[in-house]
Amino acid sequence: MDALPKIRTLAVMTAGGDAPGMNPCIRAVVRTALHYEMKVLGVMGGFDGLIRGNFIPLGARDVGGILQRGGTILQTARSKTFLEPAAQQEALRQLNAAGVDALVVIGGGGSQRGALALHQRGVPVVGVPASIDNDIYGTDICIGVDTALNTIVDAIDKLRDTASSHNRAFLVETMGHESGYLALQAGIISGAELVLIPEIETSVEAVAQAIQDAYRRGKTHAIIVAAEGARPSVTELASQIDEMEVGFTMRVTILGHIQRGGKPSAFDRLLASRLGTKAVEFLHQGRSGVMVGLSGREVVAVDLAEVAARKRDLPLEYYQMAITLAR
Amino acid sequence: MDALPKIRTLAVMTAGGDAPGMNPCIRAVVRTALHYEMKVLGVMGGFDGLIRGNFIPLGARDVGGILQRGGTILQTARSKTFLEPAAQQEALRQLNAAGVDALVVIGGGGSQRGALALHQRGVPVVGVPASIDNDIYGTDICIGVDTALNTIVDAIDKLRDTASSHNRAFLVETMGHESGYLALQAGIISGAELVLIPEIETSVEAVAQAIQDAYRRGKTHAIIVAAEGARPSVTELASQIDEMEVGFTMRVTILGHIQRGGKPSAFDRLLASRLGTKAVEFLHQGRSGVMVGLSGREVVAVDLAEVAARKRDLPLEYYQMAITLAR
Amino acid sequence: MDALPKIRTLAVMTAGGDAPGMNPCIRAVVRTALHYEMKVLGVMGGFDGLIRGNFIPLGARDVGGILQRGGTILQTARSKTFLEPAAQQEALRQLNAAGVDALVVIGGGGSQRGALALHQRGVPVVGVPASIDNDIYGTDICIGVDTALNTIVDAIDKLRDTASSHNRAFLVETMGHESGYLALQAGIISGAELVLIPEIETSVEAVAQAIQDAYRRGKTHAIIVAAEGARPSVTELASQIDEMEVGFTMRVTILGHIQRGGKPSAFDRLLASRLGTKAVEFLHQGRSGVMVGLSGREVVAVDLAEVAARKRDLPLEYYQMAITLAR
Amino acid sequence: MDALPKIRTLAVMTAGGDAPGMNPCIRAVVRTALHYEMKVLGVMGGFDGLIRGNFIPLGARDVGGILQRGGTILQTARSKTFLEPAAQQEALRQLNAAGVDALVVIGGGGSQRGALALHQRGVPVVGVPASIDNDIYGTDICIGVDTALNTIVDAIDKLRDTASSHNRAFLVETMGHESGYLALQAGIISGAELVLIPEIETSVEAVAQAIQDAYRRGKTHAIIVAAEGARPSVTELASQIDEMEVGFTMRVTILGHIQRGGKPSAFDRLLASRLGTKAVEFLHQGRSGVMVGLSGREVVAVDLAEVAARKRDLPLEYYQMAITLAR
């Protein structure tokens, strides 16, 4: 451990899609680094900003008042070029030019792969998982998921009010192009009759049946939650089911980008604070090439190579639970 | 006044699109009626329910715990048949068969016309304006508008988080097929650069210009709020502006039915309680054929005939205010 | 009107207790002033800051992102010295030294009196009413009241959950030393059995009776809302009633300062935006010595002398409504 | 396992202090039991209700619409008598008389001891941990903690608005007579300068110092979070520190019972649904005398005897983290 030189300057960045809780994480990184007497630079605009050498100094007051703010004060972007060696080389040059000794990368799965690339080029780096899709291997949960779930559940609670008043069935689309995690959890906790996810195929008939069953059981409304990537899509379903006799009239709601915003929840603020703190402590202790993750009550380090190589799987027992609890 | 017989049985119904605050209004009607020793019946399912004679008895405890619930426990529907004389005749027969002496109709503009039709057939009736579109003549504001505005503003606050983090411009569609009221108010209080409403034509170029101006003034995001009925539509705008150089990338969010739901706000609970109370008091005093409305600090009665005949106009000074305040 | 010189520099300040909505009001004042090509200075720290000459320049970007923030970025204080002529004289000197041509004062009743004093000394000044107590003459409602009511109602909704689960009666104290406005409105919209306000005396026995009546009517809880200034106090009531047999066990909750905070509601944002805009427009038109106020749908100007001299009265019909609706 | 007879009738109860999430847990118990073709009875009013034989039948529709409701539809109480053998004997008699084959007890530490007593008398019983204090051994987290934390954080966010506007320091008291868990977590995620908990003694001087340090670092406010059971108390602190020169003026807020109420958060709904489902599954599989608990991503069974015997300890690393992050 003492082989590694002391960190005098730490850089911190957010990358990929934004997630609520990135700001409290930045705050934890900055203030823990100051506690260890490091100087801190923020990278503006994700990996593209890193390539452009877009650094700003960050002091204790610069991260005051951001605990409760959604989004990221460092801005972010989905970089298309960072997987190319030339771009990574340029990033390395910028980090050296700015005198950066170590880097914390807060972001989703793609960003962790970017962090791994920099680690392999010799930059001391620790990743922090932030993604509302909860699709990163190596952590029980990512920063942003809890806030997104609360946003979804609030929205569906509102839809249920109007659905009940009009004898309607709502098809609600959540985020999740490749992962059904958000949709599945949201379905259970908002009392959906059925959840449609990319991982499991469902027929139009099965959806129609679930809606009709709800009607027959005396419910005044029915809710179907579908991930963005599920097929058939909510609009296809609505138009086809509207012509069957299911008891309710059909409506579609696409929740969209509101799922990314909002004041971070208590859970996300705590998770972000813990992971951000630990990321700096690991670097301070000479560890690198890892991502911090939640494992039960503990924060652990997982090799970035393992994070990049493995896929998180969906707890499919939830699928049955959603159906059982909707009866 | 003493010509009218004492009301022994009062019926109350909700009609048209649901609006948050209908429940506290039902509660106020029921409990004020009980205070005057009336018996109360609820009509389930709007005018169609009235035609089918779908009445339920309502006591003080039946409306307990509904103050904070969105939607309407009496359910509602947009009736297609009630404008026909035969339907009205049948409603009259059902009211007589159930021994109903007077009726309170809580609903939008169409529902007030339904109330007027019953009044003209001799039913003592008072209307209560509830509509998130705020498009009813005779009241400063309708039940439901305030809650809907809070829902919209909360959603746009969330979008702003993610817009700022990604340098994006959001085109946000609110409800409002024929009226730009909601969109205009929402635009002012959520800091939109521009508001698109059915009442005012706007070109694609003007929208692009407003977005580009925001970018040049150093904003990290831009918000455009558009009513459902405004042209061009948000999706048309997004695809056309995305090909121009405006500084931001474009995203569309259609808020949809969440705007109708949600716990009624403090304002809507108070408005609903006051209007519901006054509706029963007017009937108790022998008045009929009127709608209760808010006028400044007072609750007043407006002839239903006038409500049906006149159109509420939009305060267009708000349009300029939105632009001035967005600078 | 054209006698008055053109305003080149406008100052804006907040004074007295803070109220949610002050920030959107500051934003509206600044941006409307910029629209009229005025330069804007903010006074930091209320009247005491004015006496110290604590000015900061305010541009369009300085008030970006404050629409949704509670409190006031200009800070505020309850000044003890401003009623003295020497203090006013010093304020005048500071305004002149800074080249201020006109002033907007956002605050409560005391602050409007301060504004009047400056007007009488020749400063072109317009007041804007902001106070969660809603105790200012000349406006239907003050900035901050609506947000405070929503905060109170949310809190009482939470208390009702736990009260119902334990068969408890809650005595809830709201702000309001001399005015029962907040308590009365909150009582109606949160389903309180009884409301205690400074303006009306109530005996311990009457409170006990109201709680016992609720128990006998089959309610699972009872809520009593009391303004801070009401007598007997909630703690006195709790200890005395706990020894009587009223069916429920008693609990006390003092809501305290959370009532002043929170993201401004949609209503307060709109009210603050309208009043702030109009304050600057009035000054631009050469008007001074007035407070802007809401009157129905319109924003009007009221003489500050009248505002200072008259007392707003409480709509006591609400008192009976609270009791009727609680049955 | 097959030694145990099949469960035909299952009873479910809530006991001890109420916690948000009890309702979704009841729903999960009822619907999972129905899935296994059990009949379900609800015990009204906790252990005292059990002794009185206060059972109600629960079908699928009886638990419809309670997912989003705080408190418990089965009501609850802190029983003083249930630790006596006679009371337990009577409970046993009532369970037998009602034909109950197994019991689910949702509640805090005391309730789990009650569940153990019944298990020892031969009743097949599974406990579910629900307590906002998070003071139960055997689970990462209890039902209700997450919602309570969100309520606390929302309240402190509001206090910060007004604190910043007035240069004030707030002493905020959270629940927690014997455990500092809530206060500690709340302190970290609301940016408190210092947290006072029963487990760690703090001097008045240390609190004054922390507040003064915040002032000197340029903060516009300071927040101190204290658990109910911490000494010195918030009122003692306020009066003593007000006489020192710390830069800010002091204010006290006691959050009180609102911490128990509120719509269960997404996290609590999911946790409650999972634990409730698993409790029934364990009973169905013939397990008894255990409490279900969250361990990482899994739901596990812990012996009730161990739950009763062991004490959960507080992660004191959080204490330092709160201080580091407040800088």
Image (spheres, coloured by chain):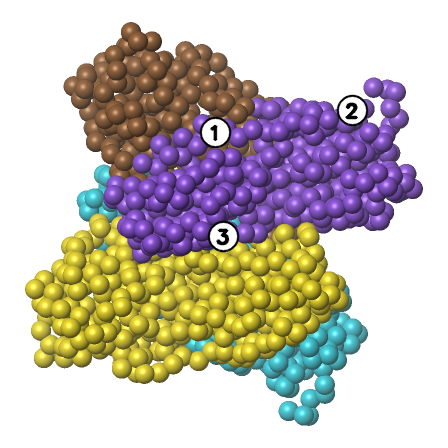
Chain colours: A purple, B yellow, C cyan, D brown
Determine if residue C54 is in view. no
Screen quadrant of the C terminus of chain D: top right
The reply to whether callout 3 and callout 1 are in contact (CB within 8 Å) is no
Which is nearer the N-term, disc 3 or disc 1? 3
Residue D303 position (above or below residue D13): above
Q: Residue at x 56, y 29 (%)?
A: A313
Give the label on residue B206, or none: none
Q: Image quadrant of residue B170? A: bottom right
Spatial CA span between label 3 and label 1: 24 Å
- What residue did someone put label 3 on? A254
Quick one: label 3, few (<14), some, or many (20+) residues within 10 Å? many
Residue A44 position (above or below residue B291): above
- What residue did someone put label 2 on? A287
Spatial CA span between label 2 and label 1: 35 Å
The reply to whether callout 2 and callout 3 are in contact (CB within 8 Å) is no
Mark toward the viewer: 2 or 1: 1
